[in-house]
Amino acid sequence: MHASPLVNRAAVASWASIVGAVALALAGLLFLLQGEISTWVFALVVIGVGSLALWVWWAPGEFQAWLAGRQTQYGTTSILVTILFVAFVAFTYVLIDRANLTVDLTSRQKYSLNAPTLDAIDRLEQTGFRVRIVGFFSRTKLREQEAADLLLRLYEGEGGDRIEVEYIDPDERPEIAAQYGYQPAYDGQFFLSVLASDGEPIPGSVPIYLGGPNERDITTGLLTVASAGSFKVYFTAGHSEADLAQIEATGISALRTSLTGQGIIVEPLRLLEATQTGIPEDASAVLIIGARARFTEQEVQAIDDYVQRGGRLAIFADPPLVDVGEATLTNTFLEEGSPFSDYLWDEFGVRVQPAVVVAPDLNLGNQFSPIVAMIASHDILTGFEDAQIVMRFARPLELVSAPDARQGQYLREPLLYSSEGAYAEFDLERMTGSRPETILDGEDQRGPLLLGVTIRRSLEFQQEAQPRIVIIGDSDVLQNDYVSNFAGNNVLWSDTVDWLTGFSQAVRFAPISDPTTLALVVSSQQRTTIATITMLLLPGIVLLAGGVVWWYRRR
């Protein structure tokens, strides 16, 4: 006997309800994953709505029973409820995954950001800065990108709208890579950009290089941004000092670039004006680079007032005679008997000698370009004792041998020395004339010569305000071509600023790590596999088993 049309219609309606539910569930998942209404999403919605409409039309009683919560004869309601439950679980998974929600269930909180990192993110939010962490990963580095994403998702989740993460394939987007000065060695590395109100990097800003994907470097970058504007370095002007705006090889414009690139404010300081108002309270450090004219007693007093309240001062001195083109000019800065020279000796027991270092044995091209032979043990240049530091027409320093009560309040810590074969030439006219190759006993001072020294208070004279002073017998050590070409000169500059201002302490971060805990990294492909098994395969098996039981009971 043939089944009645009514029975066939009820069966088709039941299948239509299942097809409609599945189609709508798939349409919702595709929309969440793709983020747009694609052709497939639209087609699945049409199929789903049409199938459900057919079910309601041909089996209104079954639809009413489903609404009332009662099972129909063949269990269509159970199947629909199962499909809806699977769809709900899938939607929830996708939404949580896209919302970047994570829970660390390890006993030591291995997969959580450290408290200092959370504080750094809070500081970033308080300052109002928005940043973008950009990682460059080519096709050969996809596995490393997946591993890095585990950490970067934590930053993005904690930072909210203040921190965003972007991955760039330098081969596919070379124009973006060029903006960051990308090189092949940066593959798998990260940069940090500060964003303007329009969500794009601030015009003219220099991205901060972070390095590899580790919490220490990333958090240090965030702290650098959060500290922007908190440090201000003043460069004295008005005494023929080196010009920060000069971009030629002999200029010092690279110093300004290095400071502003870290968010440190750079300002000129005319000491003549400061004699009335004092050196500004917001000065993290005052630098005197290549001055050639005397400081007045009033200017020296302004400097002393600043130092006594805990000021930080750096002096980079030029030789008594300075070559300018074809002319040779007298440099009166720190000349014997000048107010500033007397102040340095009477207060701190340090004198910049009226001589030039001659280094026949260890130099760069000529005897007046000595290479530093020894770096003393010091916080400055720690770990760079073998770095090559090159000077040009350097002046030796002298330290008091028997300090009086006033000088005894300070520690004079040597920093740089010349080679043993070097000597100090005091007869400058002889030097500019015959260019001596040999030392004259009784007239010249034998090496090794002191080229750099730092000054701070002794322990028994420690006060709440602790001044720090650096004196280097050369300003050419900081000129653009030397800082760019010699790593030691570059590190000397950056470490000197750090030691004076404490900038590195403000942005330093040491994460807590547990080396005994096995690192767990789940790639996006593995997450997709897990999601497929938990959201589709297992529920599909249950649905299939239910369908088999349903079909068997129908018979």
Image (tube, grey):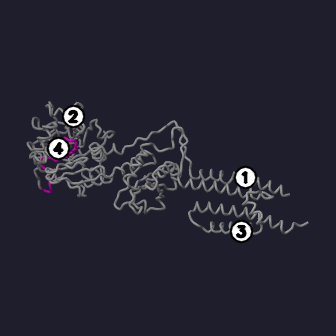
Q: CA distance from mark 1 to mark 2?
A: 79 Å
Examine the structure image and report whether residue 334 is included in the region drawn in magenta.
no
Mark 4 vs mark 3, foreground winner is: 3
What amino acid type should be assigned to the residue bearing mark 4? Asp
Packing grade of label 1 (10 A; few <14, some 14-19, many >=20) is few
Packing grade of label 3 (10 A; few <14, some 14-19, many >=20) is some
Q: Residue at x 86, y 57 (%)?
A: 555
Q: Which residue is mark 3?
A: 53
Residue 166's x, y, as percent? 47, 57
Q: CA distance from mark 4 to mark 3?
A: 87 Å
Pointers 2 and 4 in contact (C-beta within 8 Å): no
Mark 4 vs mark 1, foreground winner is: 4
Q: CA distance from mark 2 to mark 4?
A: 19 Å
Mark 1 vs mark 3, foreground winner is: 3
User: Of marks 4 and 1, which one's residue comes earlier in the chain?
Assistant: 4
- Residue stretch in magenta: 306-326
- Regarding mark 1 in the picture, which secondary structure is present there? helix
- Regarding mark 3 in the picture, which secondary structure is present there? helix
Q: Which residue is mark 1?
A: 541
Residue 501's x, y, as percent? 28, 45
Q: CA distance from mark 2 to mark 3?
A: 90 Å
What amino acid type should be assigned to the residue bearing mark 1? Ile
The mark total stands at: 4
Mark 2 vs mark 4, foreground winner is: 4
Single out the residue that lies furthest toward the front. 68
Residue 33's x, y, as percent? 58, 60
